Amino acid sequence: MTNNRLIAYQDFVTRGGSSSYPKDLTAVLVDRDGTAVEFGFKARKRWQAADARGNPDRLGYATRFKMALRSDAPQADVTRFHGSLARPDRRTVKKLISDCLGKLYRTALKEIHATSFRGIGFTEDDIRWCVTVPAIWKDAEKQAMRDAAAEAGMPSSEERLLLVSEPEAAAIYCALTPGTLLGPTRPEGRLDVETAGSRFMVVDCGGGTVDITSYQIRTDGLETNRLAEVGIPDGGPLGSAYINQHFVERVLADRFGIEQLKALTVSHAREIALLEDRWEEQKTGLHSETTPDGTPVFTGSCDIEVPGRLWEALAEPTRERLTEEAFDDPYHLVLTPEEVTDLHESVVGRVLETIERQHRSVVDHGTGDGVDQILVVGGFARSTYLRDRIAQRFGGEVEVLIPQDPAVAVLGGAVHFAYDPSVIWERRSKYTYGYICSKPFREGVDPEAKRFTDPEKKVRCDKRFGIMVRRGDPVPVDRIIKDDIGIPYPDQRTVNLSLFATFSDEPQYTDEAGCELVGTVAADVSGSTKLLSTERRVDIYFAFGGSEIAVETCDRVSGARRKATITFTELYGRHGKAGE
């Protein structure tokens, strides 16, 4: 029974010991040789002390670096690399992730080995691990995360190392342990998981990203396999960290001047970072109020102390103006209520647009009358402004719910998923997946450049896209999609199949705009050489129901099977995006 499962959380003391959080800071401190020596909030504290002394030991510090795993991540997403880790490459980022996972792995093993249940101890082989990833991550990033986990010492098999998207984990947690949630006007409410066919959208708002996915309670039973994904995951770099980024780019640029801010960012980088940290401390304690029409606003100003060394570096007219704005109090920077509201809205407004896009997609293409509930989780969900804006925009159409502690939803859901992955019984394909093949040439349709004649003198078209599943198609977890191809060459012993993905619903050729290679599989057909081509066929199996795809081939004659060795490339729609 779900309510018999015990989940142990560890609280981490945040900035200055003023509050605690169920997750440690994603931060790593490395020595001059690149070896990780400290993690989390402790790493930040040690780095700040070292940086204040001029970093004599040539340490490196990185935080908020997970999204930098994307090879196309814009510089704005890579905001916190210091010391010897300045300007890291993707390989360095992957190592930092591996270092963090290794720390987590060792800590968890130590805790597990130190405890037992009714005298029963656990070995490493008894443990299944689950790593959460953003829903917007592509296959290449998931593969990189799996590789990093394996490098950290975690088991590499898919049975013992699971990946789950963060909103999916949150959905599992809230569906299995609904508890008490808060509605738009903060009365007590509950997530409806008892009504067969009811639907809800999960909006996972973190520091770096906002991930959104929609789910439906299975209509033919609630005891097992209860959740089906009914919307293609959406989201983007819309987390609370971008409010901080706008604080620097807008507020500080306005107060100091654009050119002076650029200079100070180089000459006083530590003080600028400290000023941003002080804004973060203020931001997390702010509470918005709602106007009679439900619009959330901040009614009080925000007073931030400016580090002395940074203050002294400002031009005299700038100091005089800031002192006047701070009611004759030097060394302070005051934000008006309107500025605080605008900073939040600069990010929250885009979050609402993304929710609206997911809402329309599910309503237009799903079953039922619409998304009935919106569940807001993640650390950013603690923001009253974000919660009230979502309630204001969507509260008239659906019920907006928030767990009592939205920060633990992803963590708890990951544990439940590791215990029983079958709780998710269906997902939606993000892309149209398939493989390269040849098909009969279509006169007047296929390009002449793709025409060729096979050994049996049949005219065929090269580089056709053999579709296995289309973007947005439902893929139950136990569903395996099968196709087969013929082997026209009698001496061919191996067939190298290239696997492709695209945003297009009806791709025709693997070299058309938007189609990108995502992996290869070498099919062993050596057991059927010398046979007629009509007897030489290879079955292809695609399993899409898990959080990752699996591909396998089987020679019909010999029975030889080969699983795909996926070396995912980055599918970011460089040649075309969804909806284009």
Image (cartoon, rainbow, N blue to C red):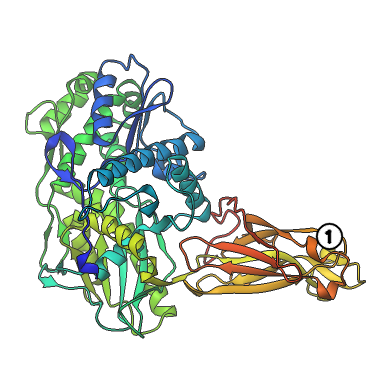
Residue under the image location 20 percent in, 64 percent down: 402
Camera-nearest residue between 169 and 551: 551
Question: Does residue 306 lie above or below 478 as drawn?
Answer: above
* Residue 333 as seen in the image, left or right of residue 57: left
Where's residue 380, x and y in %?
24, 53
The amino acid marked with disc number 1 is Gln
Whether residue 451 is visible, yes or no, is yes
Whether residue 393 is visible, yes or no, is no
Camera-nearest residue between 148 and 516: 148
Where's residue 91, x and y in %?
51, 36
Residue under the image location 13 percent in, 48 percent down: 286
Residue most toward the front?
Answer: 119
Quarter of the rendering occupied by the N terminus: bottom left
Camera-nearest residue between 356 and 54: 54
Specify few, some or many for label 1: CA neighbours under 10 Å numbering under 14, 14-19, or 20 or more: some
Q: Quadrant of residue 186?
A: bottom left
Question: Does residue 198 lie above or below 258 as drawn?
Answer: below
Where's residue 275, x and y in %?
22, 32
Secondary structure of residue under mark 1: loop
Question: Does residue 24 lie above or below 443 as drawn?
Answer: above
Q: Quadrant of residue 315?
A: top left
Quarter of the rendering occupied by the C terminus: bottom right
Where's residue 158, x and y in %?
48, 56
* Residue 539 as seen in the image, left or right of residue 79: right
Camera-nearest residue between 21 and 492: 492
Question: Does residue 96 lie above or below 506 as drawn?
Answer: above
Residue at which label 1 appears = 492
Residue under the image location 28 percent in, 44 percent down: 113
* Residue 527 as seen in the image, left or right of residue 387: right
